[in-house]
Each structure stands twice: as C-alpha cells, then as structure tokens.
Image (cartoon, rainbow, N blue to C red):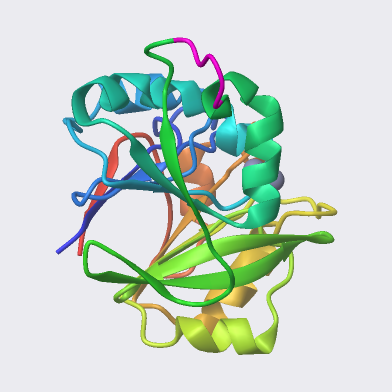
Amino acid sequence: MYRAKRTVHDRPRPQAPQTAPIILTVYSLRDCGPDFRQQLLRTNCTKIDAVLFTHEHSDHTAGLDDLRPFYFRQGNLAVYAHKRVLDALKKRFEYIFETKNKYPGVLTLDTYTIENQSFFINNKKIIPVEVYHHKLPVFGFRIGNFAYITDAKTIAKEELDKLKNLDILIINALRIEPHLSHLNLEEAIAVIQQIRPKKAYLTHISHHMGFHDEVQATLPESIFLAYDQLEITL
Ligand SMILES: [Zn+2]
Ligand SMILES: [Zn+2]
C-alpha cells in the first residue's frame, strides 16, 4: 500500500507555483524541487528508499542537496534517472559527484540509469511513462494502479496505453491559457478523460490558474486540484 503525499498549494488561497515531490510511504520520491526541505519538514518522512527524477529542470532538481540529512542517517541514497538527467545533475551538483578528494560529509548518491523500461525498487515495479515537455522527453511513473506525470505537453498513444485501469492519476495542468511545454487545464482534462482513472489530481499549477475553490467548481467529477499536504492512500 502506498500513501502518496503531494504538496501543491494551500487551499483555498491563490495558487502558488509548486513542483515539489511526491512522497510514498515506501519513501520513494519523485524529484527534489527548490522547496524540498520545507516539504519534507511537514511530513513524517524519516527514511527515503529512492529518488526518481522526471527530468532535469531546476524546479524538479534544485533541492537535491536537502537529501543530505537522509544520507547522514542512511548512507548512500539511490537515485534513478535517465542518463541525460544524471549528466545534468553531475554538472550542476559537481561536488556531490566528486570522486577525488570529496569533502567529507557531502551527500553521496548511488545512481541508476533508467530507460523507458520497467524496473524494480524494493520489489515494487516501476513503469516509466515517456511524455514530451515540448521537445524534451520526461518520465512519468506508474506504480501499481497509481501514476504520476508532470511537465507533459504531449503523450504518445503507446505511452497512454500504459495508463489504463488506474485508481489515481496525478498529472500536470499549468493554467487556463495554453502553454508551449505544459498541458493547460483544458488539455489536462482531455488527457484524463482519455485515460479514465478513477480519480485524477492536477499538479504543477501556476498562480495564473486562479483561486482553488473557483477552479475546483469548474472541474468534472473525479478531477481535483491537488494542494499542500494532500495525502492519498492507495
Ligand atoms: Zn520542466
Ligand atoms: Zn516543472
């Protein structure tokens, strides 16, 4: 059983841009956004089994160093990402990946390169779902009947086929207006209606979306705006 916590914004206040990670009770994370530390402090997360990166953009990676307290407690942390994403992390966080004369106590990671093929973490099958963020390939992930997709603009049919029979889908919806590299609200709803999960939560919401309750009132049944400290039990 997974319990996913997703922090997006406090309802019903105007929505703040938010892109921080999902935390599962197995304590796998997706991405480490800039406010990762604050997000973790609001959870009871004491152990992290793995971090799965969707892509290299800073709003998904800038909080990487905040894994350091977990490294102190647990030792090397497992990170799963596409080679392109790992290469970007190595450039941006050179001191973390230093192999000669590494400063003692710096976060140390065990990196695992993933392709668009399923893999296992602690006996949980993880199915990557490749979506396009304008021209950049980004991984969403399916675990059991739960799937998380962010920063998608287009999704090929064979990838949509991986998302059948979901209980919960989390997917990005940036704002009402169209955007070059992100689904807007209308497009996200259309994708959800194609996938037909039992429940969908919208994430990666910009403050341009509007007020929580006003936007929520316009959404079809079973589609919800995510918000800070939302907790989902699967
Ligand atoms: Zn992005
Ligand atoms: Zn993003």
In the image, what residue occupies the spot 66% across and 68% down?
A: 131
Q: Is residue 102 rendered magenta in the image?
A: yes
**Residue 25 placement (x, y as % from top left):** 19, 49
**Residue 66 placement (x, y as % from top left):** 41, 21
Q: Is residue 1 left or right of residue 11?
A: left
**Residue 1 placement (x, y as % from top left):** 14, 64
Q: Is residue 194 among the parts visible in the rendering?
A: no
Pick whichever, 143 or 149, lies toward us: 143
Q: Is residue 43 among the parts visible in the rendering?
A: yes
**Residue 71 placement (x, y as % from top left):** 30, 26
Q: Quadrant of ligand 2?
A: top right
Pick whichever, 113 or 64, lies toward us: 113
Quadrant in the rendering for residue 44: top left
83 over 167 or under it: above or below: above
Q: Is residue 123 left or right of residue 147?
A: left
137 over 104 or under it: above or below: below
Pick whichever, 178 or 112, lies toward us: 112
How many marks do you count on the picture?
A: 0
Report the predominant secondary structure element of the magenta stretch. Answer: loop
- Screen quadrant of the C terminus: bottom left
Pick whichever, 213 or 198, lies toward us: 198
In the image, what residue occupies the spot 54% across and 34% down?
A: 18
In the image, what residue occupies the spot 21% across and 31% down?
A: 74
Q: Which residues are magenta?
A: 99-103
25 over 109 or under it: above or below: below
User: Residue most toward the front?
Assistant: 100
In the image, what residue occupies the spot 51% across and 70% down?
A: 128
107 over 22 or under it: above or below: above
